[in-house]
Image (tube, grey):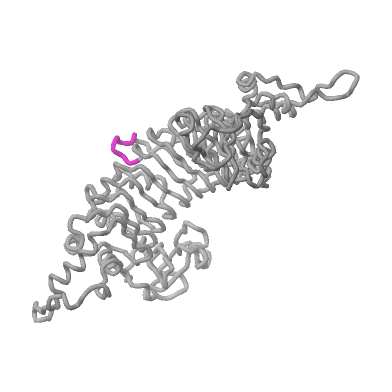
Amino acid sequence: MSEHRIGDRLSFNGDLSTVRYVGQVDGTKGEWLGVEWDDPTRGKHGGAHDGRSYFQCIIDGAGSFIRPNKKADSERTFVDALLERYAPLNDPSSNDNDVEEIRASWISGKPIVTVGFAKMSQRFAQLDKLRVITLTHSQISTTGPLERLAEVCPGGFAVEELDLSWNVLSDLCEVGRICAAFPGLKTLRLNSNRFHITGEVKVPQGAFLKLELLTLNVTYLTWDEVVRITMHFPALRELQLGYNAIQTITATGDKLPEQHGLQSLQVLNLEGNGVERIEDIAWLSTLPNLHSLILSRNKLTTLTNSTTKNILPTFKHLTALDLSRNQISSWSDIDALNALPTLSSLRVAHNPLYTPTRDREDVGRMELIARLPNVWEVNGTDVKGQERVQAELWYLARAGREGGEWTRLGELRAKYGASVPDSNATVKNTGRKVGSASGALASRVPNTKLVFYPSPPPFNSSPTRTLEKRLVPGTTVGAFRSLCGKLFRIPPTKAAVGWRNCSTEEEGEAEVEVMDDDLRRVEYYSDVSIEGEVVVWARN
């Protein structure tokens, strides 16, 4: 009989696999192992032979049959891998002259060679300095003798982060034994392991007591298994579950206990799971502390229920949402995000909302800002006050040109006091259209104060000239520098500009933010919501 069991992890020349079947195969002699390869390109089928199915693969086509005697890569204990990586016996930095003599003893008639205490103390002392342990791709399958782990890791040192990704771990209890040796552990990475979970998950008590960040990407755990695992992580703050084919998240049945890890969870990463409908993960809205949700690289086409047209679910505490690289194509879905009362950060790049050229991305950003008044970070870039003003004015102008339904039209008319004419209205008998909305709205942009200094900062004297200028929304820094050169009669190549916030500092002492990117719009740097001014000076 084979010594292998279903769920065991095996590695062959570095290629990882999971045992899915142990037994006979019709039409052949001897025993076989049915394995599923982590790299599906190594597979030959989905677990079937001559029309009979022997096992199921998580990824179709990733299976094959191998003989039990096929030589696998040697497995190692955690202790062996730790010492080999961080305290090797042949460490060139060690001084053999300082090592006490190696002693030999005899047990049951066999010689046992023991390294002297001074040598071992010197070797293990290197481990005291560790804060992060990385043992990826190390063929670790078990902890090793617990007494040896206690000897090597007395008190757990001060290790806060442990990465055991891409190993051959299949038993979460073994992971618990390892983590129990590090009582201060806060981050645990287990990506690309395959855990065999049946029934209740049992781990040493308190093994994950202080863990705040857990990564289980590409482990192909089901949501039910995730719930059973995270009950042992009472301090969990961030959970990464990317690329696990978790397409649906349903209620757990019983109410989660107060100390369950999901109750304290603040950040959840579900990238690349193939989620198609937002209502399929509606249960997540019940998590009381969830602030950030990552849904990038899924298959979402809409954020609203096809029947009610309401966004589902309503996340009461969500502040950050990542929807990048999905298939969302309607701006009405973006409008629906206003139903999330605390949302302030949104990523939605690489969705078919607009043609991905440079100009259209710029327009798309303006539309996002205008449609979402409470979002102050879009696609990883902060929204400044003047940029929002410019975006909202552009929104009003477009509404005037195109007509139709614009959800913020009434609100923004009230805010700016702007009259948006009917784009189809014409002057009687002339056939000429009424003046453009953009022109009317441009007049609403406040004047900006410009002050000129003859030399670069720090400014030790009063400005020599001061004037006010109404800036056309969307003006680039390069064009603005050229304008300032003409206004203050200095060569445009010598003109330098910056924004000074005068609301918190005494005049002359406020810090100047240099506008050093000619391709950005001026409003990226300035903020009309606070008291400030544009500072102009001549470069040396």
Q: Magenta segment, principal secondary structure?
A: loop
Residue displayed at 37% across by 76% down: 71
Above or below residue 320? Residue 243 is below
Position of residue 200 in the picture relative to residue 49 (left or right): left
Above or below residue 41? Residue 288 is above
Above or below residue 501? Residue 198 is below
Question: Which of 482 and 317 lies nearest the eye of the viewer?
Answer: 482
Image coordinates for residue 429, horizontal then vertical, percent? 91, 19
Residue displayed at 50% across by 44% down: 295
Residue 188 inside the magenta-drawn segment: no
Q: Quadrant of residue 231?
A: top left
Question: Which of 460 and 234 lies nearest the eye of the viewer?
Answer: 460
All told, the count of numbered labels is 0
Image coordinates for residue 536, horizontal then vertical, percent? 59, 38
- Could you tell me if residue 403 is visible in this image? no
User: Which residue in the rendered view is the most extreme toward the right?
Assistant: 429
- Could you tell me if residue 351 is visible in this image? yes
Q: Quadrant of residue 330?
A: top right
Image coordinates for residue 321, horizontal then vertical, percent? 49, 39
Image coordinates for residue 398, horizontal then vertical, percent? 71, 30
Residue displayed at 42% across by 73% down: 13
Position of residue 361 in the picture relative to residue 139 (left or right): right
Q: Quadrant of the N terminus?
A: bottom left
Residue bounds of the magenta highlight: 255-261
Question: Which of 45 and 331 lies nearest the eye of the viewer?
Answer: 331
Position of residue 227 in the picture relative to residue 444 (left or right): left
